[in-house]
Image: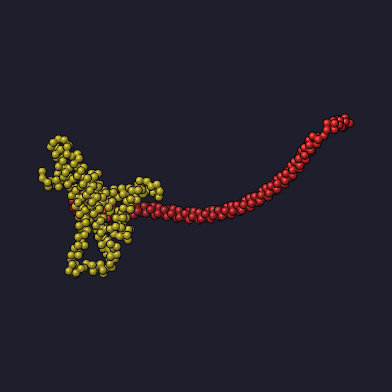
Amino acid sequence: MDFLTIDVGTILFTLINTGLIFLAFKLILFKRVDAILEQRQQEVADTYQSAEDAMANANSEKEKYAQAIANAKEEASGILSRAEKQAQKQSESLLEKARAEAQAVREKASRETEREKMLARQALQGEISGLAVELAQKMIEKEIKPEDHERLIDDFLKELGDET
Amino acid sequence: MQISDFLRGSPDGVDVSGPKLIASFELFGITINLTETVVLSWAIVLGVFLLLNWLTSDMKTKNISKKQVVAEWAVQTIYNLVEDSMGKHWRKFAPYIGALFTFSILGSLISMLGLRSVTADFNVPLTWALITFVMIHSTNIRTHGFGGYLKGYAEPVPVMLPMNILSEVATPVSMSLRHFGNIVSGMIITSLLYFALSVITKKIGIALFTIGIPAVLSLYFDLFSGFMQAFIFIMLTMVYISNADANAEA
């Protein structure tokens, strides 16, 4: 062939070949890649959707839990305050009881003391009277004559002997 | 030896001729020539089919293979290029641009295998330029209406009519000749260089210059030039067609 010619056959074949390569690009490369890109986009969208759903779900769960926790807290504080009140009451009653008991003990103790005091006084009176008698006897002894004294001893011995 | 001997094809081996004729037959009274160009084009078509089929086989949405990355990158790049130069509504044009670019670059780079560049046959860029020509005018008619299309030749003033017609005709001629001329001149220069280097080798007895120099020059004349011409051709095609589009965004 000449270096520079216009050849209808070559043009025709080039047209067909260009068309074939175009078809290859359109039907193989672009179609498949577009399909896969679209599929991927769909998957990404799905993933986002499910992520959003999960997020919404989690949020509602969270709210639910927060509600439950708030309820529990309220309940706990209720229980606590009730328990506190009860404890207060109990301790007050205990204190009351203790106070009353202490009062009773104190009263008893003071009664006892009173009685002891009385007993002691009585005993002291007895002793004092004994001492007075002794003193009186001693005073009497000084005035007794020896003969009387002897008689007294004898009487005492007689009395002792009668008794034995 | 004279320079003209190189071009004529001297017995020493410089061959700068047209594509070889392989077969010829008559169809409806027209002689159809099966030339080297046509046969190599078939090889390119087959290669493109196999390559694209391999690239896009077994594609997944996750954990993609390297070849799928290449395929997706190619598609996105072509889409971006077309959308940037023609607007979003020309998106469907992308496969043609990809096909044209691939055919052109492979047609030029086939010379690196020691074969004759398909694009060094004027008929090939001429066919593409004619396709572009038809697209320019059909787009013009489709978007402006036939009356508007005809009126376009008389603008801005009716005196411009012959100039406008000439400029429309000049478009495919300049496009095809630019592509053809660049590739064929690269081919001629490379052939001359090989011949000159072989003469030097014969004279000094050692293949000192035939190593390295042809590779560097081939890098420019085959690889760079082939790429540039393919790129220029698709850019011009897109610019001309979107200029003819009355609904152009830009």
- For residue B243, which quarter of the picture? bottom left
Q: Residue furthest right?
A: A162
The residue shown at (17%, 47%) is B188
For the C terminus of chain A, the quadrant is top right
The residue shown at (78%, 35%) is A138
Q: Name the foreground residue: B83 vs B14.
A: B83
B197 with respect to A149 (left or right): left
B181 with respect to B92 (left or right): left
Task: Tell me what hue chain B is rendered in.
Answer: yellow
Q: Name the foreground residue: B48 vs A123.
A: A123
Q: Residue furthest left?
A: B1
**Residue B217: in sight, yes or no?**
yes
Q: Position of residue B161 (x, y in %)?
A: 19, 67
**Residue A57: in sight, yes or no?**
no
Marks counted in the figure total 0
What's the coloring here?
Answer: by chain
The residue shown at (83%, 31%) is A146
Q: Position of residue B152 (x, y in %)?
A: 23, 67
A162 with respect to B94 (left or right): right
- For residue A125, which quarter of the picture? top right
The residue shown at (17%, 37%) is B208
Q: Position of residue A63 (x, y in %)?
A: 51, 55
Q: Name the foreground residue: A94 vs A138.
A: A138
- Chain red in the figure, letter: A
Q: Position of residue A129 (x, y in %)?
A: 78, 40
